[in-house]
Image: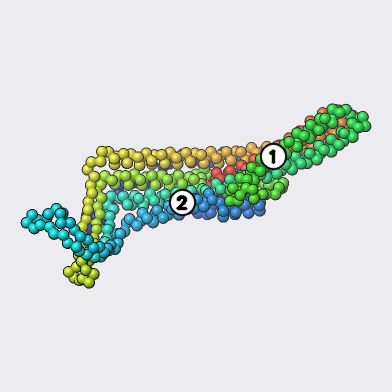
Amino acid sequence: MLALAALAGCATSPVYQRPTVEMPAAWKVEAPWRESAPNDSIARGPWWRRFDDPQLDALQERALAASPTLALAAARLAQSRATVDAANAGLFPQVGLTSRAIRFRNSTNRPLTNYNSPNASTVQNDFPLAFTVNYEADLFGRLRGTIESAQASAQQSAADFENARLVLTSDLAANYVNLRELDIELDVLARSIELQRKALDLTSARHELGATSGLDVAQQQALLDTTLTQVDVLQRQRDQFEHAIAALVGAPAPLFALARETGLRTPPAIPVGIPSDVLERRPDVASAERAMAAANAQIGIARAAYYPSISLSTAAGFDSNSLSTLFDASSFLWSIGASLVQPIFDAGRNDANVSFARSGYDAAVANYRRVVLTAMQEVEDGITGSAALDRALVQAQRATDSSERVLQLANDRYEGGATGYLDVITAQQSLLSSQRQQAQLLGQRLLVSVFLVKALGGDWNP
């Protein structure tokens, strides 16, 4: 027992330390960005409620309840937790009960045990009943390494579940924002078509009175036909986003529909914190870090194969050729023993397994660094993109206002005979282009907000 206690302190797994990653002191930010107080213990949702859209809230709740992707991640998490329970069971003795009832006849021609006593065939009964206890002494950390690896893998699965939830909700929000941006564009086209039809009626009436040529009518008709074509193109794109949303919420695409909405939406103010926050906030970073811990434990498991494997076993029970005497004192039997297996020659198999485990750890470290660098890139892209789009939206509003004034002036000059109808056509096209660009920039700004929330790891503590 003293020897076992002394050897129990032996460990083959390297001491795990999270590798350092160079982190900048701050993001490249512009006003009105502000720092947040990170708190990894709070839930990462429901961040979408900050967009103040009841329809989006309802879709997110539906997706969380019915998404097959999230159900798959939950099942894998349950499997990993069961694996931890199975690994922990290896630390305890395994107790069993064995019993059988057989009647057998042995062979007369079986090998002799004594040349002076010839064999005879007998027919017998055998009724054994025994309790068995088996225990593997974890002297060199194989079982502890297995448990450490299983625990790290379970924690990785938990992070993967959170990441699947974040990806699901952000994908749904992105598709929803794209769909609503197309709703605004379709509304712009509808209003432009109405104006262009009125302009076509006006030019047709003036042509019938001989005030204009047929060229003016043909130009206006061509502009109207081009605009009507754009409606079909945008409607096809909208249908695709609607079908993607249906799949994310777990609904058949033919049975799913969203009514058009053209209300303007304002992105929330998102606190960005400091770059090192992503190490605590992002579930994919946590998953990559836990994968390193699991890979580190695998090195210890591989190293343990160099050392002896010691198992203790005991058994006690009864054995008799008759049920009536099975529990007699003379039928009692017992055994106790230990087995030791020490590898001597394996043609380099253990060396290869250790090398494989080390390479797996190196791969996990490289993946961790890659995930962290990608996280910082995504956050920085979201910050700079948001600032640039905010400025572009202000300029787009000015361009739309200017285009409306140009169209009004062109109409006045045309009706006064000071210019040709081509100036009116050009002004109509410019206004339509400005309005659509403004709608597209608004959609991009909302989309960047969704991606920035995803890049930062979800919701934040206000």
Position of 412 relative to 301 (above/below): above
Position of residue 82 in the picture relative to residue 224 (left or right): left
Position of the N terminus by quadrant: bottom left
Residue pushed farthest left?
116
Count of numbered labels shown in the rendering: 2
| Residue under pointer 1 | 234
| Residue under pointer 2 | 76
Within 10 Å of disc 2 (Cα), the crowding (few <14, some 14-19, many 20+) is some
- Secondary element at image label 2: helix
324 or 123, which lies in front? 123
Q: Residue at x 75, y 41 (%)?
A: 188
User: Does any portion of residue 378 appear in the rendered image?
Assistant: yes
122 or 423, which lies in front? 122
Position of residue 40 in the picture relative to residue 194 (left or right): left
- Secondary element at image label 1: helix
* Residue 29: x %, y % from top left: 58, 40
* Residue 441: x %, y % from top left: 67, 39
Disc nearer the start of the sequence (1/2): 2
